[in-house]
Image: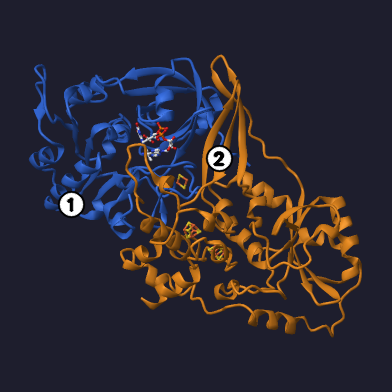
Chain colours: A blue, B orange
Amino acid sequence: MGNDYTPIPVEIAKITTEVDTKDIKTFRFAFVNKADEEKFQYRPGQFGELSIFGKGESPIGIASSPTQKGFVEFTVQKAGVVTSALHAMEEGMRMGIRGPLGNSWPIEELQGKNVVIVGGGFAFTTLRSLINYVIDDANRKNFGKVTVVYGARNPGLLLYKDELKTWAERGDINLNVTVDKGDASWKGREGFVPTVCKEVAPSPENAVALICGPPIMIRFTLPVFFDLKFSKENIITSLEARMKCGIGKCGRCNVGSKYICKDGPVFTFAELSKLSPEY
Amino acid sequence: MKKRLLKKSGIAELVAKLAKRAGVFAPVDNEGNTLFQKVIDANSIAKQYVNSKDAPKGFFFPHSETLMRYKRTDKGMELEDDQVAQTKRILFGVRPCDARSFELLDLLFNQEKYSDTYFVSKRENTTVIVNACVEPISKNCFCTSLGLSPTGSAGADILMLDLGEEIFVEFITPKGEALLDCFGDMEPSATIDVQAVRERAATLVDASVPCREIKTTLDNIYEHPLWESIAQKCLACGTCTYLCPTCHCFDISDEVKGDDGARIRNWDSCMFPLFTKETSGHNPRSTQKARWRQRTMHKFKYFVDNFNEVLCVGCGRCVAYCPVNIDIREVVKSVAKI
Ligand SMILES: Cc1cc2nc3c(=O)[nH]c(=O)nc-3n(C[C@H](O)[C@H](O)[C@H](O)COP(=O)(O)OP(=O)(O)OC[C@H]3O[C@@H](n4cnc5c(N)ncnc54)[C@H](O)[C@@H]3O)c2cc1C
Ligand code: SF4
Ligand code: SF4
Ligand code: FES
């Protein structure tokens, strides 16, 4: 019997500092054992418990896409004990990952649909995984129009800046990057995510909206999508909660009878409206 | 089902034989508390006890348990050992409610996807010998309110029933039968009326708590003044959850000494304010009201939603030991009145 508490050994292959404030970094991990890489079959929207012996574990969304082989990436904000320890680590050092954990973005149900992706702040990570999955050469034909609205407080806080450029150059994504407040060199859009969503006004026709961001962004973005006549079934988000086990045992991450770690983190708003509002 | 009759005077020999097979743990009087402890001879086993103060779930899900050890290398801390010790054990004198709690915990810990190897392997290596409740039965007991019986064999490998001079023994599972030879070879005669003993015992237990019936009410009272009124008295001490045979929440933490470290899991409690507090400071259950609601909902609604069972066995420990006398039976009854 396998031990679901034992982390898979990984080595830090690459560290990218994403933002001017330097407190968000993307960690690229390579599996120490080839066999683990084969076993680590994940889907966009899943997460892993990043495990540093001596410090603890933190649940972090997987930021890379399964279509990218040979590594797995996580984008982590420095927050407390584990994430600070992680930020202090260097390329070549070893640590662990438990996972992949949780459900995922509903990639089967999204097939043939227009996909509207809305992200704010650093909660964009698993949406980035989804975007890279959808625009992968082998997959792109399976999805309809792809509309992305992604916002950060200022240009320095945008994640994945190089990737945003390559996405912008593609003809097959309607990419709308916005910042609350630009700076001298910013030539792009200014405005809050909900406002930009209103302007972009994606059609609800055969469409699903996936929305991730800080609670305040979600609160103001949801009404925009309801006004656009998206149904609760077709608006999907990913929840967070304090976690430990990540596998539905330790009892702390439930919303009603569902565990965010095991039954989530991805839920439709139709599902959430039936659960206790405890998140 | 195989059955035996054991003379009370034969218990010493029985325990001695069992102890040769595996470590035997039984309720022992310890400075005013009855606690499960390792026994070598039958003399140390508590003669009269309602139930142990500590729930025997701790044999499978210890209060504190090392999950794995690791060591410092030049690339960081690396795993050294995550093996679960395979020690054979016999629990002797578990009460029926607590044996039933093992089955409920199995539902959670032993799932097809994500089975908890620490819990499951200890379960597999342990034989549960239940001592049915004939007498004394505490005024706090309400197992019959959950459809259980004080002489029930749920979760038992072997069931012992005290008939006065003799003990009636039933071998419920193959694991139990493997110990058949320790119990001698006297078969009970057909005239022994065990049923009457069982029925009498059941009448001594409070069956009036609508533990299973309140689910439909709970479905609709997430917002209700009741939660605040229960929580007002609560000290958030966690006693109720630590003593409860079915509570399973835990924390995982790391401890390092020099170049060696261990990842340890400890019981945690939904009654504690920090249980759900996130690094950002956000806490989805920031009040004791929300936490008491969680405790009630988890036992009588969420677990039913997920497993179709109530997560309480009516042992009465939380009733007996809450420092401010919050009584789960009263909570359930209050919900039923809504
Ligand atoms: C499904 C999911 C995906 C996430 N994805 C990301 C991501 O992509 N990038 C990112 O930077 N952060 C993400 N988070 C938040 C991240 O898990 C917390 O910021 C992190 O656990 C803080 O850990 P710490 O040890 O640094 O902080 P401490 O305050 O020292 O926390 C101690 C422990 O508490 C638990 N904990 C505390 N806060 C949280 C929380 N908000 N969520 C879950 N567990 C918590 C963890 O077990 C943590 O190790 C995600 C959370 C969840 C639940
Ligand atoms: S809730 Fe109370 S009565 Fe029910 S099993 Fe737990 S400790 Fe026993
Ligand atoms: S034992 Fe009583 S006071 Fe302590 S947490 Fe439980 S209900 Fe609250
Ligand atoms: S993190 Fe343990 S139950 Fe979800």
Judging by the rendered image, the residue that carries numbered circle 1 is: A230
Res A204 visible: no
Along the line of sight, the residue nearer the viewer: A84 or A92: A84
Identify which amino acid the numbered label 1 is placed on: Phe
Q: Is residue B55 above or below residue B207?
A: above
Picture coordinates of residue A251, whole percent (x, y): 47, 50
Describe residue B307's horizontal placement relative to residue B15 as left or right.
left
Along the line of sight, the residue nearer the viewer: A16 or B255: B255
Q: Is residue B119 above or below residue A165?
A: below
Picture coordinates of residue B12, whole percent (x, y): 89, 61
**Rendered residue at 39%/78% (across/down):** B337
Q: Nearer the viewer, mark 2 or mark 1?
A: 2
Q: Quadrant of residue B205 in the image?
A: bottom right
Label 2 vs 1, first from the N-terminus:
2
Res B249 visible: yes
Query: Element at badge 2?
Result: loop
Callout 2: chain: A
Describe residue A74's horizontal placement relative to residue B55 as left or right.
left
Residues indicated by labels 2 and 1 sit on the same polypeptide chain: yes
Q: Quadrant of the C terminus of chain B?
A: bottom left
Q: Are marks 2 and 1 in contact (CB under 8 Å)?
A: no
Describe residue A17's horizontal placement relative to residue A72 as left or right.
left
**Rendered residue at 35%/27% (across/down):** A78
Q: Is residue B195 above or below residue A54?
A: below
Judging by the rendered image, the residue that carries numbered circle 2 is: A4
Q: Quadrant of ligand 2?
A: bottom right
Identify which amino acid the numbered label 2 is placed on: Asp
Q: How far is mark 2 from mark 1, CA to CA?
A: 39 Å
Crowding around mark 2 (Cα neighbors within 10 Å: few <14, some 14 to 19, many 20+) is: some
